Structures are given as structure tokens and as C-alpha cells.
Image: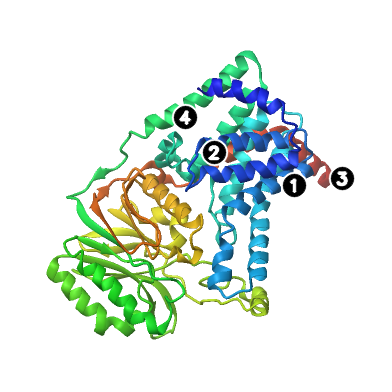
């Protein structure tokens, strides 16, 4: 199939004299179609092949520019929804929200620019296969990985996420999302080779591409973890509280009553999960009036309840974005990875005056204890994440192998009816697959879901619908290779590919530097 696709693509591409800059921009935009809600996973391979084509015969400087344009297409079409939270809920003027979003996208695109520069800087004088098969996947993944942690990180739209429903997803429990990104970029390089090479070389590239994808499909059948005890009946609540009234003092009673009513309808479940900051009051303010009676009712019914709400340390005055477990026992998790500019202000001494100038509304949450990644829920320890914490795989696997299942709570109402909710659900599915754990996802306005240990959706509740999702989940034990080793195998492989592909240029650079020092 890969070879027949190549034979169809080659004459079509040959007849399209697309300017390289436009090709790079279009390839970035096309990549967005591989992610949810479109989920056209093979499109990413075609887009990466087109991106590499835009880099051929470019100087390193031109390659940086084209890489940056690729990033502008990717992030410009993929995360422009950021402006919704700034404009509609952050009370910014529309022009300010659009300007700041555009600046953010331009900065994120620098990572793609750096990957393009790295490919062309290191492939000078190398054999023709080095660029697409070594430097391209190596550089793309190294910069994607750096983007995931530098300056608190923005790991959204990693190439691997778009493969959650495709054959390459089978590699996720072994290599994680960056490992799949590496295979996507390698597949794009193979496709480029199959289009441009001739005869046996073309056939070899096509066969390698097909084998890579068939191998992933085969790995999808492997169970990396084992059941631990009986299944649980779980309900995930979605109250669908409009963001415009969520923090309105006059709406507090209605919000609490909505969640309690939904809870009472599902007391036959072993576990009930509420969304992030489901209650807009601090824990200590509503303990006696609401939480203690609710916990007593839960104990009487044999039910565990996990709910999101802010919590304050009364001694220090610091407050946290919390997740509280009540029922047979009580435990509290405080969000560890806060959203910059949403929950705290990074580089406050530098950025404070700018925030004041634009009148950006800003919370001032404190991060929780990094040594506490688990929440005790009934008889189980659970790996929990709040909002976009689940986009950071290394933080999720800190709860393993102790965690029997995973919970993610969020409030994606900040981003309206945009690409953000389905993209976020896609990320949650990847975490379930990487860890071999069922995952419960409770959101205020959607998309709430129950996900099995293979990343498959058991059931979902559409956006902007009030209700609940109920299904059986299976607590599990054991650890996937990714849970044990994290990103290091994938990142190390990317580094090795880059060093091997660029060894000539790296050697020359070292010799040149040494000669300068020796003078």
C-alpha cells in the first residue's frame, strides 16, 4: 500500500512547483488534520515529507525560516484557540488577545525553525539518505522534547498525539509520545525517499515504511499491565456550568446543587468524579456545610467521591488548585504544574509591568508538593492530574506503578467550542495508553470520558451537555516500558540519529574550534 501511494504521489508532486516557503507553511497547517477532532493520522507523514522537501537545497538560514513557517502553520491553525480565554474570559480587548496569541504562536514556531536549521546545518556533504532518515527525525524530536519542558513547557501538538487511533500507537507503551513522533518523522523521511529515489531504493523505502506501521499494529494487541482486583463502577460528572458565571458569588449555590444532584443520581457507583474547581469555594469554607455531610452519605452508600475545588493553607495564606477524595477516607492532592499566566505569573519581576500595562487578569496559585503524585481513593492509590498536567507524561508516570488507575479533571470551558477540548481528550488517551491504566476524565463542559488501558474510549459525553458518563473500569498493576524509562529511550535515539547524521559537520566544528584555541 505504501508503494502504491508513492507511485500516485510522485507525478502529482512533480507537477506542483510550490514555493518552498509556502510548502513549509502549508505542511504545518496540514499537520493539524492529524490531530483530533480530524484524526487523519497518515496526513502527518505526508506533511513531514513536504516539510523536508521545503528544506532541500536551502541554506541553514533559509531552512530556519522555512521551519519557522512550518511552526506558524502548525500552531497558527492548531492552537489559535488560546485567544478565546484571553478575550472572552480574560476581559482583554480583542486586539490585545489576538496580538498576544500571535506572539505566542510565533515563539512556539521557533522550535520548528531550529529543527529546520539543524537539519541543513548538519547534512552538508552527507549522503542523500542522511537528511530524511537521520537528521529529520532526530532534530524534530529533540526540539519537540525541549519545547515540552523549557520555560515550564508547552507540549501541545506533539506529532505523536495525532497517531492515537492509528497503527503507530502500538509503540506508545514502549517509547511514549515522543517515540511515536520520532516514528512519524522517520515515516515522513521514508516517504520522501520513496518518492525521490528510484528502482530498488524506492521499493526498499516503501517496504520499510509499511513494516514500521504493520509492526505498530501488531504491538497494539500486547497487554503490558495486568488486572488488579475486581472492576469498579465509575461515574464522571459534567455539570456544564457556563464559564461566564462559574465564579459569580450569586451562582455558588446553584453550582453546588447541580453537582450534588448529579451525585445523588449515581450513588450506585463505586466512584464518582467531579471536574476541576467544580466548587468555586475554598475547602475550609464549605467543609461543615457541604463536604462533611456529603462524605457521610458517600460512606453510607459505599461510594468514593473525588472533587475539584480550591484549597487554602490557613497558616501561610497560600492557596492551591486541589482535588479532594472523600468517602471511606479523605485525601487532598494539590496541582503541581501550574498554568503560566493563568494560575501564576512566571518571571514576575520582568513581566509584571507588562501584565499591568495590558490589565491581564492573573491568579496566584501555589504549586503542590512534587513528592505527592498520588491520591488515596478508597482502597486504591490513584494517579491524578489537574487540567493540562496530563500533557506532561513524566509527571504522570511519577505515580506508577503504585497507581491502580488515573484521573484527570479539567475545565476546558476556557476555550469554548474550539479544537482545544478534543485535542485535550486525545492527550488523555495517550497517557492511558502509555501507562497501561484506565483513565477517568471529568470536565466542566466537556469532553468528559472514560478511557481504557489501551487508550480507547469506553464512553464519552459531548461538550456543553449536562450529565454523567458511567462505565466499569479495571484497576491494574505492573508497568509499561515507558512507565519505567520515560522519554530517555526516545530522546536518546533522537540524539544518536542527530549525532550520526551530522558527524562530519560536528567533527569539522570541533576541529575548527580547537584550531582557534590552539593559535
Q: Residue at x 56, y 24 (%)?
A: 5
Residue 283 % position (x, y): 33, 79
What is the CA distance from the residue labelled 2 to the residue labelled 1? 22 Å
* Residue hosting label 4: 213
Find out whether the residues at labels 2 and 4 contact each other: C-beta distance under 8 Å.
Answer: no
Colour scheme in use:
rainbow
Which of label 4 and label 3 is nearer to you? 4
State the separation of the CA atoms marked 4 and 3: 53 Å
Q: Residue at x 57, y 56 (%)?
A: 79
Determine which of the numbered discs, if any, sits on residue 182 in the image.
2
Judge from the rendering whether residue 79 lies leftward or rightward of residue 264; answer left or right.
right
Q: Position of residue 515 (x, y in %)?
A: 82, 41
Q: Secondary structure at mark 1?
A: helix
Neighbours of disc 4 within 10 Å: few (<14), some (14-19), many (20+): many
Whether pointer 3 and pointer 1 mark residues with C-beta atoms closer than 8 Å, the reply is no
Q: Residue at x 33, y 64 (%)?
A: 466
Amino acid at each position: 500500500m505504501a508503494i502504491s501511494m508513492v507511485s500516485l504521489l510522485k507525478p502529482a508532486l512533480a507537477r506542483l512547483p510550490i514555493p518552498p516557503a509556502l510548502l513549509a507553511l502549508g505542511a504545518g497547517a496540514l499537520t493539524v488534520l492529524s490531530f483530533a477532532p480530524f484524526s487523519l493520522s497518515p496526513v502527518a507523514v505526508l506533511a513531514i515529507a513536504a516539510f523536508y522537501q521545503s528544506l532541500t537545497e536551502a541554506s541553514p538560514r533559509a531552512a530556519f525560516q522555512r521551519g519557522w513557517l512550518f511552526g506558524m502553520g502548525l500552531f497558527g491553525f492548531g492552537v489559535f484557540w488560546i485567544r478565546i480565554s484571553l478575550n472572552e474570559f480574560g476581559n482583554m480587548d480583542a486586539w490585545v488577545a489576538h496580538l498576544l496569541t500571535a506572539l505566542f504562536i510565533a515563539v512556539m514556531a521557533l522550535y520548528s525553525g531550529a529543527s529546520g536549521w539543524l537539519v541543513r546545518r548538519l547534512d552538508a556533504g552527507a549522503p542523500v539518505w542522511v537528511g530524511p532518515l537521520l537528521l529529520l527525525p532526530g532534530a524534530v524530536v529533540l526540539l519537540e522534547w525541549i519545547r515540552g519542558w523549557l520555560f515550564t513547557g508547552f507540549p501541545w501538538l506533539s506529532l505523536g498525539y495525532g497517531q492515537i487511533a492509528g497503527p503507530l500507537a502500538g509503540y506508545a507503551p514502549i517509547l511514549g509520545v515522543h517515540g511515536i513522533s520520532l516514528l512519524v518523522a522517520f515515516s515522513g523521511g521514508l516517504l520522501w525517499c520513496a518518492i525521490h529515489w528510484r528502482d530498488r531504493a524506492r521499493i526498499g523505502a516503501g517496504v520499510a515504511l509499511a513494516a514500521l506501521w504493520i509492526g505498530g499494529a501488531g504491538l497494539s494487541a500486547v497487554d503490558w499491565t495486568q488486572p488488579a482486583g475486581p472492576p469498579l463502577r465509575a461515574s464522571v460528572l459534567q455539570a456544564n456550568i457556563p464559564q461566564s458565571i462559574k465564579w459569580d458569588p450569586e451562582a455558588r449555590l446553584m453550582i453546588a446543587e447541580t453537582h450534588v444532584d448529579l451525585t445523588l443520581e449515581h450513588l450506585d457507583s463505586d466512584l464518582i468524579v467531579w471536574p476541576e474547581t467544580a466548587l468555586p469555594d475554598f475547602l475550609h469554607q464549605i467543609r461543615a456545610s457541604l463536604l462533611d455531610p456529603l462524605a457521610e452519605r458517600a460512606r453510607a452508600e459505599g461510594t468514593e467521591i473525588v472533587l475539584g475545588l480550591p484549597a487554602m493553607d490557613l497558616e501561610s495564606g497560600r492557596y492551591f488548585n486541589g482535588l479532594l477524595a472523600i468517602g471511606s477516607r479523605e485525601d487532598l492532592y494539590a496541582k503541581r504544574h501550574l498554568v503560566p499566566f493563568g494560575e501564576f505569573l512566571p518571571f514576575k519581576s520582568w513581566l509584571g509591568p507588562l501584565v499591568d500595562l495590558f490589565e491581564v487578569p492573573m491568579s496566584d496559585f501555589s504549586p503542590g508538593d512534587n513528592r505527592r503524585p498520588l491520591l488515596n481513593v478508597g482502597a486504591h492509590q490513584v494517579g491524578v492530574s489537574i487540567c493540562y498536567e496530563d500533557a506532561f507524561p513524566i509527571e504522570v508516570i511519577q505515580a506508577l506503578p503504585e497507581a491502580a488507575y488515573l484521573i484527570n479533571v479539567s475545565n476546558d470551558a476556557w476555550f469554548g467550542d474550539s479544537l482545544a477540548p478534543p485535542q485535550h481528550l486525545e492527550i488523555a488517551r495517550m497517557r492511558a495508553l502509555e501507562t497501561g491504566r484506565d483513565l477517568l476524565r471529568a470536565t466542566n463542559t466537556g469532553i468528559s470520558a472514560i478511557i481504557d488501558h489501551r487508550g480507547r474510549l469506553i464512553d464519552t459525553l459531548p461538550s456543553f451537555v449536562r450529565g454523567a458518563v458511567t462505565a466499569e473500569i479495571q484497576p491494574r498493576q505492573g508497568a509499561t516500558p515507558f512507565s519505567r524509562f520515560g522519554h530517555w529511550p526516545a530522546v536518546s535515539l533522537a540524539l544518536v540519529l542527530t549525532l550520526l547524521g551530522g558527524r562530519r559537520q560536528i567533527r569539522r566544528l570541533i576541529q575548527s574550534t580547537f584550531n582557534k584555541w590552539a593559535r
